Structures are given as C-alpha cells and as structure tokens.
C-alpha cells in the first residue's frame, strides 16, 4: 500500500521506459528464466533420487539440498565465491571464474531457488500412485519409457508449481547475487540490485522498480 501511495504516478510512464530500468528488467527476466531451467535440469533428477532411491546418506543429501532455504543468502554468495571465484576451489583448478559475470548471476539464483523445486517435485513423486508405473512395467515398458510416459505426466503439476516458485525466488534474489556477481549495470545488476542502488540516489526510482517487481 505504501508503495502505491508513494509512487510518482505523474512521471511513471516515462520512468518505466528509462534505459536503466529496461536493462535491469531484461536481465532479471533472462537470468531468472535461465536459473529456473538449470534448476529443473538438476533438481528433477535429484528429486527422483531422493523420493525413489534408497541409498546411504540420503538424509544428508536432502539436508544439503534444502540448506539454502535457511542459509543467509550473503553466506551462500560467499560460498559460491570460494568455489567458483578466481581463487576458489574449482575456479583456481579449472582456470576460470564465474564471479562478477552474468553466468554468476544465474548460478547464484539457481543456488537459492532450486530447493523450492526439489521439495515440490519430491512431494509430487511421493504422492503419485505407483500402480500406474507398475502397470507400465508389467506391459513391458522399460524404466526410461515408464519415467517419460508415466511418471513425468503424473508429477507435471508438481514440476510446474516448483518451477513457478523457483522463478519467483530467482527473480527476487539479492544477497547471494550481489556477493557473488556484484552490481554491474547491464551485466549483473538485476532489479533487486537496481532497487538497492536507487535507494541511495533516487527514492522515486526505487519505488518504480519495486512496483515492477511486485507486478
């Protein structure tokens, strides 16, 4: 309500098409979408593993997957920096750095958002009726065919819900992004980071950016 009351409605149309606003919005949508795709590619198989496969250390794996939900985002950003930074565990060994790049933004957003997808898909898998999968196996379908033609359609609503939550969380990510990727306009400055920067220079711009995020 305060944002609506404080919004500069007279100058709002002009502010919405300012280059800085459009650039931050475009980058936010692009990186959040890429982070969601990455989370789906990694998270769905991980959810299947946690829901359907018994293996030593499964509780530990689940705890690690859900850790970003309770971990301060800034701490997550520091952890990513220590792994993928120029002097990080992987960065120094492989000779590259993802820190302070657009790819780093995607990685930071996927890191904090993927648990939402894994939890949703794992819950859908546990609630799915396994009799359909058993019937498919009885009719001669292999594991892959059963998964693609039976299991995936059964849990598709869970995947869609998890992906939506993941995208929304990625779109609003701030702490891990600014710590790991920085706040470089046009490269790593997403909408939340633009709001933070605008608060120091132009309150009306911060209000406009916040309204765009809410919409």
Image: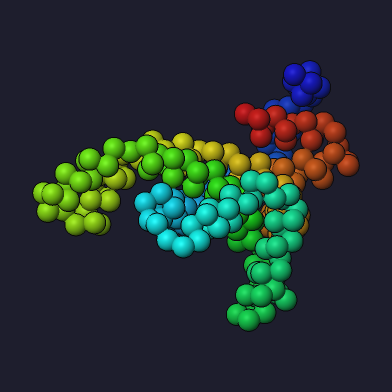
Residue 153: image quadrant is top left
Disc count in the image?
A: 0
The picture places residue 109, in percent across and down from the top left corner, at 62, 51
User: Taking 185 as reference, is 160 left or right?
Assistant: left
Residue 214: image quadrant is top right
The picture places residue 25, in percent across and down from the top left corner, at 64, 42
Q: Is residue 137 above or below residue 128?
A: below
Q: Is residue 28 above or below residue 212?
A: below
Q: Is residue 75 above or below residue 197?
A: below
Q: Can residue 70 be seen in this view?
A: yes
- In the rendered image, the quadrant that contains the C terminus is top right
Q: Residue at x 24, y 56 (%)?
A: 143
- In the rendered image, the quadrant that contains the N terminus is top right
Q: Which residue is drawn at 85% across and 39% down?
A: 199
Coloring basis for residues:
rainbow
Q: Can residue 189 be seen in this view?
A: no
Q: Which residue lies furthest to the right in this view?
A: 200
- Pick the front one: 13 or 134: 134
Q: Residue at x 42, y 61 (%)?
A: 55
- Pick the front one: 117 or 213: 117
The picture places residue 125, in percent across and down from the top left corner, at 37, 43
Q: Which residue lies furthest to the left in this view?
A: 139
Q: In this view, does 161 lie above or below 151?
A: above
- Pick the front one: 143 or 175: 143
User: Taking 122 as reference, is 108 left or right?
Assistant: right
Q: Which residue is drawn at 62% across and 75% down?
A: 90
The picture places residue 196, in percent across and down from the top left corner, at 80, 43
User: Taking 37 as reference, is 140 left or right?
Assistant: left
């Amino acid at each position: 309500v305060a944002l609506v009351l404080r919004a500069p409605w007279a100058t709002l149309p002009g502010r919405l098409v300012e280059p800085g606003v459009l650039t931050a919005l475009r980058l936010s949508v692009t990186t959040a979408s890429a982070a969601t795709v990455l989370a789906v590619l990694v998270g769905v198989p991980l959810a299947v593993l946690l829901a359907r496969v018994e293996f030593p250390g499964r509780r530990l794996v689940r705890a690690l997957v859900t850790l970003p939900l309770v971990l301060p985002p800034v701490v997550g950003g520091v952890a990513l920096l220590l792994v993928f930074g120029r002097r990080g565990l992987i960065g120094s060994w492989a000779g590259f750095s993802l820190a302070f790049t657009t790819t780093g933004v995607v990685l930071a957003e996927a890191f904090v958002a993927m648990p939402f997808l894994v939890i949703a898909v794992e819950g859908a898998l546990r609630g799915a009726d396994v009799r359909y999968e058993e019937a498919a196996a009885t009719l001669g379908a292999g594991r892959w065919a059963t998964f693609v033609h039976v299991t995936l359609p059964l849990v598709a609503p869970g995947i869609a819900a998890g992906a939506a939550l993941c995208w929304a969380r990625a779109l609003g990510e701030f702490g891990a992004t600014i710590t790991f990727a920085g706040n470089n306009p046009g490269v790593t400055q997403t909408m939340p980071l633009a709001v933070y920067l605008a608060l120091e220079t132009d309150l009306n711009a911060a209000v406009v950016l916040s309204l765009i995020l809410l919409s």
